Structures are given as structure tokens and as C-alpha cells.
Image (spheres, coloured by chain):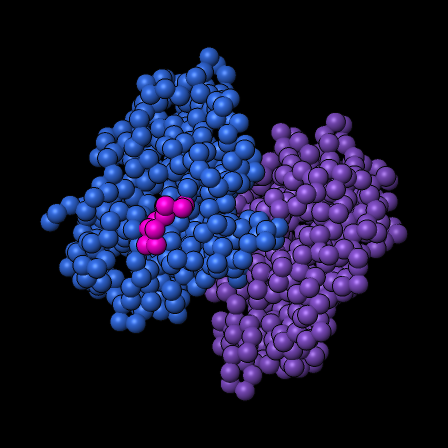
Chain colours: A blue, B purple
Amino acid sequence: MTQDGASATLYFGPWYRRSPFFEATRRYGCTAYDVYNHMYLPAYYDDPVVEYWHLLEKVTIWDVGVERQVEITGPDALAFTNMLTPRDLTTCAVGQCKYAPITDENGGIINDPVLLRVDEDRFWLSIADSDVLLWAKGVAVGTSMDVDIGEPDVSPLQVQGPRSREVMDSLFGRYVTGLRYYACAQADLDGIPVVIGRTGWTGEVGFEIYLRDSSRGDELWERVMEAGRPYDIRPIAPCEARRVEAGIFNYGSDMTLENNPLEVTGMEHLVDLGQQADFIGKEALRRIAAEGVRRKLVGVEIAGDSMDGELAEPWPVLADGAVVGRVTEAIYSPRLGRNIGYAWVPVELSMVGTEVGVETAGGMSTARVAALPFADPAKVIPKS
Amino acid sequence: MTQDGASATLYFGPWYRRSPFFEATRRYGCTAYDVYNHMYLPAYYDDPVVEYWHLLEKVTIWDVGVERQVEITGPDALAFTNMLTPRDLTTCAVGQCKYAPITDENGGIINDPVLLRVDEDRFWLSIADSDVLLWAKGVAVGTSMDVDIGEPDVSPLQVQGPRSREVMDSLFGRYVTGLRYYACAQADLDGIPVVIGRTGWTGEVGFEIYLRDSSRGDELWERVMEAGRPYDIRPIAPCEARRVEAGIFNYGSDMTLENNPLEVTGMEHLVDLGQQADFIGKEALRRIAAEGVRRKLVGVEIAGDSMDGELAEPWPVLADGAVVGRVTEAIYSPRLGRNIGYAWVPVELSMVGTEVGVETAGGMSTARVAALPFADPAKVIPKS
């Protein structure tokens, strides 16, 4: 829900794709959807604060079928995929995941997928909201590399929250719950083929189940629900407050093609200019690194009463009476008791502690640049 | 509105872009939106049948800022753009528009934009709902052609309906209303820079106004409304019934990347395999042309009571008890007094007059393959 309650009616239409879990989300009471990668993405089942606490204290199931996979296979799959991202993939083992921004020739961010090396010659880019398939296929037109690029029949679910380990254990056993953070493995559930990743959009302990047969979506959903019942599992939508706490960015709002990874707090370290591979954007990013960036995406804490809901549109950031940037998200963190979010600011105003003005939906306020993440991510599975 | 009333709440968010006409659409009472090219697209202001008749009898204004422009400029702009489409652009004059499908290396349809040759070395692709910008930029990575590709600050409005000529005449004069069908011209409205196209998504007489300065969106909208008042202008959403009558397809529902232009009724003629240029997909389409296609997107008339609203999702097409295709849109045409739409059918069932079964939201029915367009497009401006 947005801070000014701004909403509209979304009529379903044949131009939107449905995830194999869509009917389940309707059955379990989801009434608000976003549109993401041309598909429906659950927006809320319940009060977002109720969903937030359930995620922090128990276990939750999310339909994130919108995370389409761009699959790159073939003898040159590694070399080709390595060309798409500023990260060095030559050290990426089979069964490893990496957060891997994709950049264009100017260093602009095309997407920020989680990459999975599913097999020696099989990479998946689990994408945010832009048609990376078209980008990768377009790049492939002009190369002589031997690769196949497509969108396989893969639909992820997220199982997130402190009790997710028990749920996954009862479904898949120790083989899966023993995965390290950002590792993945092939598995099956009585014949339902999946890949499991120790990943998620929360910073909580959590897993992603990549369903490899969309005809079995409802069956998988109900199996997870059944296994989760002893732990009070419930379906929720992607949780804004928790992802901001974790310092996770949202492509399309926090950053777009207009931005490069050197401008994004934390993403600078993923740009490996020393690697041997000539990834797309390397020359531009080398130049930008030498010149220094002019603006930065930073964490901010916003003063004032606790905010009710999310942003409907960006808010202007002001310094000395002039607009110098924008807030891309701001939300109340119930456990931190503060309004937290992200903002683009000039690099000279990007140091932690710097104060700027913000024109919120409710009037003028101030924001202070904060270190990321806001809350320590629970990346390590606690010994129970 | 959908035939089974299927809808949800869409919360506004900073991850959707707003057209420069968005505030105007809200002010004029739009309450339902689609999401298209990561932006809000008006879905309805009023009863769609009321909007339909207004379009057919008077004049209407549409916010189609979602039609993003992919701009290709530079010395090799013609050669590069020609490589993207099966149409032969070497005969495309400056000031000419062309309906130009974009194909991948398999002949699959990436998008079906209207192309505008705005200048000798400046092409715009006025795109449907997929990130053609990423495709074109990706292709450019691997070429040595001297082109720049980007998304300029351009936002189209459509002014459609029999009285559109008078409205455009009072705004821009004969220079614009004298444009031939599928011609375009640069113009300005007291300093508001625009390009005008004699194009639209209706088959009615109509124009598109491509605003070239988004800071002046509200001003342009109100100028059009003011000029249209004597002709009873009103804002409407893209009109499904009228576009189906005209035999116009909708990318993302009627056809996708899985389809090629040789499979789409009417689009076969746009594939010029005899041209000199080696456009992307030429080899594949040559092979497909030689082998013959196996399925076809055709017009259908569906028996039974007049349908109330649009499809929420595709309907199965049946022959001899087996699913052999799908209906991609079906809607009641008030002036034809029939349910019309499109369906994918095996090529052996694609001849006009062939009857197939359809599993509609309301039960089993039959569909008969029909010639396209359903209603003659009013492409020629009538002498008033």
C-alpha cells in the first residue's frame, strides 16, 4: 500500500503471463498485484506489517515466478556469460550463485540478476524487471561464440524466514538445508524437478525453489504449505521493509539503465576491472572509475512520524533549496523504529551522516545518509 | 473490463514510470490502468461500449506515452534499422511510417512497432510492450556500424475518430491534416515540439502526436482538449473492439517471440525475402517459407450471446475433442453485432469459413475463421 493510498484497478488480460502459482495466490487471498516481467506479482495478501512480522518470526512462501530465467548453454556459455557482467565468473563453481549486475556498453545497469551456475555449461540469470533475454540474444547475434540463449520452463518460489530451514528439511532433507549461503543444487520432490538456491530477497534465512515443470506448480505450492503448517507458514508478497533493511535494491526504481554499478553503494565491489575478460562496459567503467562518480545511491533515514506504506513515486531531495536528487524508496521499519530508504544524492553529499532535505508526500522533512545494510542480514543459518 | 470480472488492485509505485499525460488521465477520471513498457496505460475511463461509440462517431484523445521510442541515429542508421526488420526500408522516405515487425535470428517476433523515418539518419521505432531498446543495443554491440541507440524524450498521444481532422486542423493547420496515411511530419504548437503521424491503433481516421518535451505534457493535453471541445472530444483508453475490427494485433497476447510473421495473417506480406539486406531472421524465415508454416493466427467469429468485456486469459481451441490452439482475444463488436477475435489454429484449420470449438469462460462454443479486417478501416480522410 502506498503512503497516499494511490492505486487503481488492474484488469487481468491475456497480455499478462501467469505464474504456475498464480491460481494458488488467488486461492490464498491475494487481491493486489504488480506487473513484473509481463507477469502478475503478488503485492499484498494482508496488512504489510503483519506480513513483515510473519517473515521475521516464522516462515513465508512467495510466488516469484516473475523472476524469469535467462538460460545460457553451450560450449561457450561461461565465456559469453562472463562478457555480460562486470563480475569475474572464471572462479564461479558449478552449484554457486552470484549477484551479478548486467551492464551495457556505457556501464549502465541493464538488470541485476542472481546468477546460478546450474551445470558446467548452463547458467541461469534470475532476472529483475527488464527483458534481459532480448539483450543477451541481441549480443549473441554479433558474436561467433557457440551458445544457446532462451527462457526455460523455470518458476521460482521463495521460502523465507527463520523456520524455513525446518520446512525445507522436511521436504528435501539435509542435502538442501546444508547449502552454504549463495549455493544451489539440483533436487526433486517425489519427481517434481527443482533447483534449490540458498538465496532470497530478504536477508533472512531463506531458500528459493526453482520449479522446472510449470504443470506442477499447484502441487509444489501445496506440498510446501503442507510441510510448513507445523511452523505456521503463510503466503506473503515480497516484503519492502525487510528488503530495504537488508540493503537490497530494486531494479527499475532504485536504479535503472541510467545508472552504473560504481554509483550504487555496495555494488562498486562487484566491478572487477582487473579481470582478463573484456566484459561489456569495461572500458566505460574504467573511465568512470578514473574520473570518479558524480552521484551515489545511498541509504537514508528519514525524520518524522512513522511512515504508513510505500512510496507511490520518487520524492525530491533538496540541498540549499535546489533539487539535487531523489528518494527512491522510504518505508517504516517496525523493528528498527525508523523510516529507512534509499536516495540518489550528489557524491559530495553521500557520506554517512550527511543531512539533506526531502519533499515527502506529507511535506518537507530531512534525511540522513546511513550505512548499509540497516539491519544485519541473517545470512548464516543459525544452529538450532 | 474482463468477461469474468477478474481484476485486482494495482498500487502505484516508483518502479512504474509515468507518462507526461498521467496526471491529466487521473484528473479526467481514469481509474483502471494496465502496465505496459514499465509504465501506466489507461485501461478505462467509462463503460468501454460508451468509449467505443465515442471513437466511432466523434473524436477521442488517448495517453499512449507507453509507446516508447527506440531512436536509431548516425551515418549507418538506415543500414542498421534495415537489419532489424524483414521489411525493405531502402524505399522508406523521410517522413514515412511503416508497420515494421522486428525479428530475432529464428524469425521470432520481438516486437511490432510503427517505424518513423523522422530524418535522413533518424529512425524511431514506436514500440509495443517489450524492451526493444535492449535488443537493438545488444545487436549494436557486435556490429561495426556507426549508430547511436537510445530512448529519446518522446511521448505519443493519439487523437482518433472522424472529427480528429478538424481538431488537428485547428491546432496545426492543413500542413498536418493533409498528411497521407502512414506519413509523418515535424511540427510545433506555439513552441511545443512534436512529430505528427497519420497513424493510430483504430483503423479510424486519426493522428498520433509525438511530444518531444515531456515537461509540456499537461499543456499539450489541455490544448488538444480545448481544440476538441467544439467536436465533443473525450479521453478514452485504447479501444479493444475497434482495434480487433480493424484487424490490428496486440503484441504479447496475440503473438509473442514464439511466433514468426509468416504465421500471422497479413504479416506474411511484410517479410521481404528477396531484398538485398541480410536482416536478422532472414535465413530462418526463408527456411520456414520453404517448409510452410504449421499454424496461423486468424480472425474468428464466435457464436453465442454478445460477450460482455474482454478475455482475462486465452481460451482453448478444440478440434475432434483435442486442444489444437487458443483464442487470444474475443470481444463483442457493437456495430457488427457479432463476437469477433483472433485465434491460433493449425494451418489446416486456417481457411476462412472453417469451424472449430472454443472453450469460453461461459462454456463451450464454436468459432468460424473470418477474413481480416472485420470492418473496413477508414484509412482515407473523408472529404468533409
Residue shown at the point (71%, 47%) measured from the top left: B80
Res. A327 in view: no
Residue shown at the point (57%, 58%) measured from the top left: B252
Residue in the foreground of this view, choosing between B344 and B150: B150
Give coordinates of residue B367: x percent, y percent. Answer: 61, 78
Residue shown at the point (72%, 30%) measured from the top left: B192
Is residue B270 magenta-colored?
A: no
Tell which residue pokes out farthest to the left in this image. Answer: A384
On the rendered image, what quadrant is the N terminus of chain A found in? top left
Residue in the foreground of this view, choosing between B79 and B367: B79
Residue B191 sits in quarter:
top right
Tell which residue pokes out farthest to the right in this image. Answer: B383
Vertical comparison of B104 with A350: above or below: below
Vertical comparison of B354 with A347: above or below: below
Tell which residue pokes out farthest to the top in this image. Answer: A320
Give coordinates of residue A127: x percent, y percent. Answer: 44, 49
Give coordinates of residue A84: x percent, y percent. Answer: 49, 45
Vertical comparison of B51 with B355: above or below: above
The number of numbered badges drawn on the structure is 0
Majority SS type along the magenta span: loop
- Tell me if B172 is positioned left or right of A142 in this view: right
Residue B121 sits in quarter:
top right
Res. A94 in view: yes
Q: Give the range drawn in magenta.
A: A89-98
Tell which residue pokes out farthest to the front in this image. Answer: A276
Residue shown at the point (27%, 29%) measured from the top left: A338
Is residue A93 magenta-colored?
A: yes
Give coordinates of residue B257: x percent, y percent. Answer: 58, 60
